[in-house]
Amino acid sequence: MREIALNNVKKWLPKIVSDSQLGFACLYYVEGNTMLSSSLILIDEFWLSIKSQFPDDVLLALPRRDQLFVFDAGNPQAQVGASQIIEVTFNDGFNLLSDKVFERRDGKLLAQA
């Protein structure tokens, strides 16, 4: 079942849109099926596709089901920026997913305490 689910997400890889207007983070979403956006963190192909922009560890914010924010963990603004995005999103109250900041360190996903 997991393999079927991951293959379904992989089919949408060509539809990934990135928006780096924030400067300290990049927003990713799946055009035409935005509810899959948070699932991108589960597939290696996504991480390979952004490796040139984020070669090292990253922080992640998934405040809404249709949004994935990626931050360079080496940027001193990353933690504050992730927390601010989550706060603004939760104040808005639409389509909420998680109020946690996550890390991808050495290829492993971790929730921050």
Image (cartoon, rainbow, N blue to C red):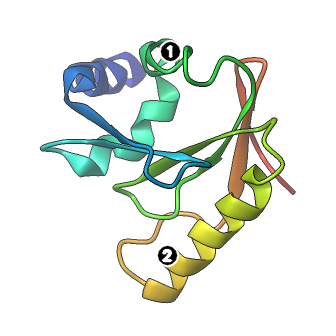
How many neighbours does mark 2 have within 10 angstroms: few (below 14), some (14-19), or many (20 or more)? Answer: some
> Label for residue 89?
2
What x and y, as percent, mark residue 65? Answer: 39, 58
Q: Mark 2: which secondary structure?
A: helix
Asked whether 3 or 42 is in front, the reply is 42
- Side of 70 relative to 17 (left or right): right
The residue located at (45%, 44%) in the rendering is 20
Snapshot quadrant of residue 4: top left
Mark 2 or mark 1, which has the lower sequence index? Answer: 1
Q: Amino acid under label 2?
A: Thr
Up/down of 63 relative to 1, above or below: below
Snapshot quadrant of residue 85: bottom right
The residue located at (36%, 72%) in the rendering is 95
Q: Amino acid under label 1?
A: Asp
Asked whether 9 or 86 is in front, the reply is 86
Between tags 2 and 1, which lies in front?
2
> Label for residue 95?
none
Q: Label 1, on which residue?
A: 44
Q: Mark 1: which secondary structure?
A: helix
- Side of 19 relative to 50 (left or right): left
What x and y, as percent, mark residue 112? Answer: 81, 51
Up/down of 48 relative to 1, above or below: above
Q: Quadrant of the C terminus?
A: bottom right
The residue located at (43%, 63%) in the rendering is 64
Q: Quadrant of the N terminus?
A: top left
- Side of 57 relative to 45 (left or right): right
